Amino acid sequence: MQLGMRSPLQSDKPHSPACLHGVFEALQRLPSPPSCWKLKTVPSRGSTQHRSKRSCCHAQVHAAADLAEKAPETATADFNFEHYMYKRGKMINQALDKALPMAYPPDVIESMRYSLLAGGKRIRPALCLAACELVGGDLEKAIPSACAMEMLHTMSLIHDDLPSMDNDDMRRNKPTNHKVYGEDVAILAGDALLAFAFEHIARSTKNVAAERIVQVICEVGKAVGAEGLVGGQIVDLKSEGLGRGVGLETLQYIHEHKTAALLEASVVSGAIMGGANSQQIEDLRKYSRSIGLAFQVVDDILDCTSTSEVLGKTAGKDLATDKTTYPSLLGLERSKEVADELINAAHDALSSYDPHKAAPLRSLAEYIRSRKN
Ligand code: GRG
């Protein structure tokens, strides 16, 4: 039921547009200002040696002369990542708004839309679309999956912020879902986003073979269940307060499941929808596992080096709650090295791909390495 239509349980009064407060505004906004997409380095074809020689500049800045000479190897040097993410952000926000219009019952739909359209960097849908493009797929085929990834990610943030989990007040620079709508509604909004993500893939994906759609649904189901997000989250919760009792192996399990699994599903789903063969899926799985773990290592680093204002959520939480993190186990410098090694491995996984076609995924990997929030 669309906004303004009468619900079966209501009398004459159509919903007041006031219940959409902030949502239209949020829709028009980009996830973040374009400047947040600036890259520190220009990714090259994949050799660590080349990368270390690279000059430090933004992705859209024309390559330095030495890089220009190696044009085939460093095609990302003239790839405008900021512009790319600006366009992708807009496309994704519009698709999300269209996928989940205001409807009855407004209490839960408004809460779902509040978090879904609250901003966010849209990295998972961007990865999904970039993987689809890399294997030569038509973008339209992966848009429902890309939206589903953001729905699932948003669901996990809503649940993660609950008092019984991380108990956070701020997310994406706004009050968390349960602070605005109450815990009961926030739980249901998360549940509904979880269910809708699967419905959306199944219902809205067009011109893709049914087998591929089922393959994606399996991939995504595994990524969010006990072998994915839930698995990572439960081990994380049960590790609280154990301090040094949590070793690197357990920490890696938590990060790989709680964070990397959904990033992997995003990339692999985009590739499957785009028509990838099994070798391409394998390469992209390697790429995504590396960026996925790197993403959380960087998250740990940012938690202890950045501010709440920049992060849009409470900074310093890991230290305050005595949480085991990469910096707490390995120190800050070694953690940065680990993140670098993982990003370099991600580049290596793309080494056999056309540099121009791989530029978005390479730039996304670089962004994950150098992101500030
Ligand atoms: C209920 C099926 C089910 C699963 C939920 C709560 C939970 C299980 C898992 C927690 C997963 C979680 C919140 C992991 C942290 C991942 C992370 C680093 C999030 C930050 O991602 P960004 O930086 O955020 O992309 P934005 O706001 O930019 O989208």
Image: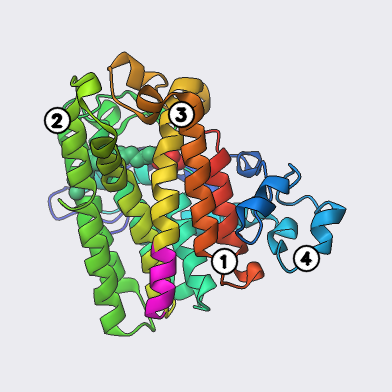
Q: Which numbered mark, 1 or 3, is in the foreground of this view?
A: 1
Tell me, yes or no, if residue 143 can be seen here.
Answer: no
Q: Amino acid at mark 1?
A: Ser
Question: In the image, which disc is placed on residue 238?
Answer: 2
Q: Position of residue 6 (x, y in %)?
A: 23, 54
Q: Secondary structure at mark 2?
A: helix
The reply to whether dot 2 and dot 4 touch (C-beta < 8 Å) is no
Ligand 1 lies in which image quarter? top left
Q: Is residue 254 left or right of residue 10?
A: right
Residue 351 shows which numbered tag? 1
Label 4 sits on residue: 71
The first of marks 4 and 3 along the sequence is 4
Q: Which mark is residue 301?
A: 3
Image position, residue 353 (x, y; %): 57, 72
Image side of residue 52 versus residue 296, left or right: right
Label 3 crowding class (10 Å Cα cut-off): few <14, some 14-19, many 20+? many
Separation of residues labelled 1 and 3 (CA atoms): 28 Å
Q: Which mark is residue 60?
A: none
Helix, strand or loop status at disc 3: helix
Q: Where, quadrant-wise, is the N terminus in this rendering?
A: bottom left
Work out whether mark 2 precedes mark 4 in sequence or the reverse, and give the earlier one: 4
Q: Do labels 4 and 3 touch, CB within 8 Å?
A: no
Q: Residue at x 71, y 61 (%)?
A: 74
Secondary structure beneath disc 4? loop
